[in-house]
Amino acid sequence: MLKKIIYLVVVLLLLGSSFSFAEDELENSEVGYFYARGKVIEVLSDLQNTGENNTGELIIDHQIVKIKVTSGKYKNEEFIIENYVSGNPVFDIIVKKGDNVILDIEENENGAPQIAITEFARDRYSGILLLIFAGLLILIGKMKGVKSVISLTITGIVIMKFMLPLILKGFNPIWVAIFSAIIITSVTFILIAGVNIKSFSAIIGTVGGVVSAGILAYIVGSLVKLTGLSSEESNMLMYIPQQINFSYRGLLFAGIIIGTLGAVMDIGMSIASAMYEMKTINPEISPSELITSGLNIGRDVMGTMSNTLILAYTGSSVPLLLLFMAYDTPLIKILNLDMIATEIVRALVGSIGLIVAIPITALSTGLILKYRHVFPKFKKQINEE
C-alpha cells in the first residue's frame, strides 16, 4: 500500500511540474520583452476597414480590444490595445469576449508596455487532455498505468532537459539522440517491467533496432544528398541568437532515431515478454524453439507496426500531397524533391529499424534464457514463476 501511495505522489508531482512549466517559461523571459497570459474583457471595435493610405497601400484591418493581463509583471492590469488582422488565416488571431490569449509585451525606453496578442492560450486545454490520458492509464492499467505515466514524464524530461539543450550547445545530434534513446529505453523498461530478463533483452533489441536505423539513415541520407533543410523550422535555426553551426543533416537523423524509438520499444517488449512467458509455462522448451517462436511473434506484429510508422508520416504530409495532385506534378519530380525524399527515408528507415529489432530481441532473449544460470537472480525469477 505504501508503495502505491509513493508512486501516486510521484505522478501528481510530475504532472504538476508539467503544468507549471509553461507558466515558468512565460515569467522567466528577458527584462523589457516577455510573454504573459491575458483575457479578452471586451471587443470595443471589430475589424475596422480604413481603406488605403496616400501611397495606395492597403491599411490592415484591426480590432480594438480591452484585455486583462492575468500573469507576470502586469498581472490584473487592464489595457486597450489594437489587434491587427492581415487577412491571412495562418497568422491572424481574431478574438472575441472571454478568449484566453498569449500576449507579447515589450517595454519602450520610457517603461511603457506595448502589448500585442500573439496566440490563443491553448495549453490549458492540452493539460485537460493530458489529465484524461493519465487518468485512463491509471484507471485501466492500475499500478502499470501509474508507472507508464512516470515513464512518459521522464521521457519528456530527457528530451526537453537533456537532449535538446545538448544539441543547442553544439554537441553532435546523432550521438546525443542515441544516448537519449538508450536512457529512455532503459528507464522505461526497468520502471514498467522491473530488472529482469524481459527488460534486459527488450533493451538490447530496442537499442539495436534504433542504432541500426540511425546508421542506415546516415548512409542513405548521405547517398541521396539530403540537406536536412526541408522544413521551415530547420531554416529558421540559421537565425537563432546562439549562432550555432548545426549539422542539419545530423538533426534530421536524430529526429529519425527519436521518431522510431516508440514503435521499436513496443515490438521489443512484446517479443521479450511473450518469450519470457513461454519459458515460464514450458521450462523444457529448447532455445532454438523459443527463438523461432519469438521470430514468429515478431512477424505477426511487424506488418501492422510498419504500417503505423508509414501512415503516421503520410498523415502529416496530406496537405502537401494534395498540392501535388492539384497541380498534376509529375511523379519523377515529386520523388526527387528534398522534402519528399526526406519523408521516404524517414518512414522506410524507421520501419527497417523496427524489423531489425525483431531478430535481435528474439536472439538475445533466447540466449539469455539459455544461459540464465550465469545470472542467479534471473534463474530465481524463472523458478519462482
Image: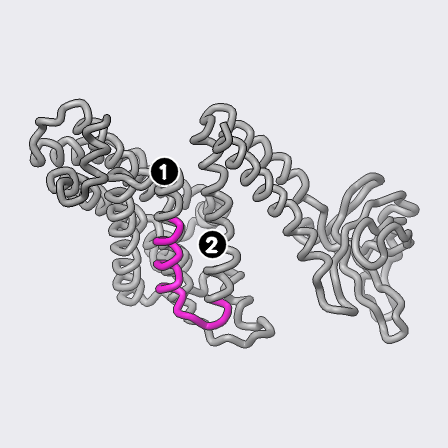
Task: Please tell me in which quadrant of the rendered image residue 263 appears.
Answer: top left
- Main SS of the magenta part reads helix
Q: Residue at x 48, y 55 (%)?
A: 159
Q: Where is residue 52 in the image (x, y as percent from the top left)?
A: 85, 62
Question: Left or right of 357: which side holds 1?
Answer: right
Task: Inspect the magenta stretch and tell me whether residue 271 lies in it.
Answer: no
**For the C terminus, which image quadrant?**
top left
Q: Position of residue 214 (x, y in %)?
A: 30, 58
Residue at numbered disc 2: 158
Q: Residue at x 35, y 42 (%)?
A: 189
Distance (Cα) linking label 2 and label 1:
24 Å
Q: Where is residue 313 in the image (x, y as percent from the top left)?
A: 41, 45
The image shows residue 104, relative to residue 372, as above or below, that is: below
Q: Choose between 288 and 240: the one closer to the eye.
A: 288
Q: Position of residue 324 (x, y in %)?
A: 45, 49
- Amino acid at dot 2: Val
- Assign a secondary structure to mark 1: helix
Question: Left or right of 173: which side holds 210?
Answer: left
The image shows residue 58, relative to residue 301, as above or below, that is: below
- Amino acid at dot 1: Thr
Number of residues whose C-alpha sits closer than 10 Å to that of mark 2, classed few (under 14), some (14–19) or many (20 or more): some
- The label on residue 189 is none
Q: Choose between 161 and 88: the one closer to the eye.
A: 161
Q: Choose between 24 and 384: the one closer to the eye.
A: 384
- Assign a secondary structure to mark 2: helix
Count of numbered tags: 2
Magenta segment, which residues? 167-184
The image shows residue 206, relative to residue 300, as above or below, that is: below
Residue at numbered disc 1: 308
Can you see residue 38? yes
